[in-house]
Image (spheres, rainbow, N blue to C red):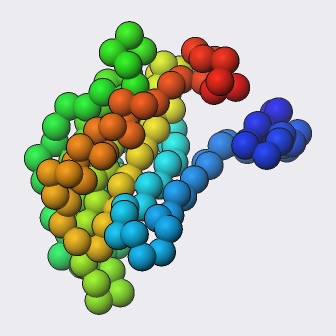
Amino acid sequence: MLYHFNEGRIEAPDHVSDRTMHLLAPTPGTGEMTVAISKDELEADETPPEFLKRQLADLSRQVAKFTRGELLPAQLGAPEQKIGGSKFTVSYKQQGRTVHHVQSLFLLPDSHTVLNLTFSLPVPFTEEHHRKVDAVLASFVLRGKDASAL
């Protein structure tokens, strides 16, 4: 498999799957959120709601005081890309600290890859933070749809 990443590409061995995770950390002292981008694959015959249920069950077993907010519909990129998904808030205790996330999941056009964008803060999200999350989600351009994305 020819595998591309920002700095270049490699010829990856057969029978590996791309489980890339990108972490965009805020500049120290800014108080801004961390953005983690990862992807996963649906299991055979798994639907996106089943995937979400499985992921949340796994997370809730790994952390203390897990809570999830309302599941809301979300759009990734411009409406013409037709990449719908969902987003929700999550909080839990990890290493004695409460962590707050807005998690968003989107099934990509290949119908088996789930793109996960997780926004994290050490404090609860404000309306301004939610606007920033929505702006990041709206800015998504599917690779190949725009020459600048290549």
Q: Residue furthest right?
A: 11
Please identify the quadrant where the N terminus is shown: top right
Please say if 95 is above or below 105. below
- From the viewer's side, name the closer residue of 59 and 149: 149
Rendered residue at 49%/48% (across/down): 37
Query: 48 left or right of 123?
Result: right
Q: Position of residue 42 (x, y in %)?
A: 46, 36
Residue 61 is at least partly visible in this image: no
Please identify the quadrant where the C terminus is shown: top right
- From the viewer's side, name the closer residue of 54 and 73: 73
Q: Position of residue 67 (x, y in %)?
A: 16, 64
In the rendered image, which quarter is residue 131 located in? top left
In the rendered image, which quarter is residue 79 located in? top left
Query: 49 left or right of 141?
Result: left
Query: 133 left or right of 29?
Result: left
Q: Residue furthest left?
A: 70
Rendered residue at 18%/76% (across/down): 65
Rendered residue at 29%/38% (across/down): 134
Q: Residue furthest top?
A: 80
Residue 123 is at least partly visible in this image: yes
Please say if 12 is above or below 82. below
Q: Position of residue 43 (x, y in %)?
A: 47, 37
Query: 47 left or right of 16?
Result: left
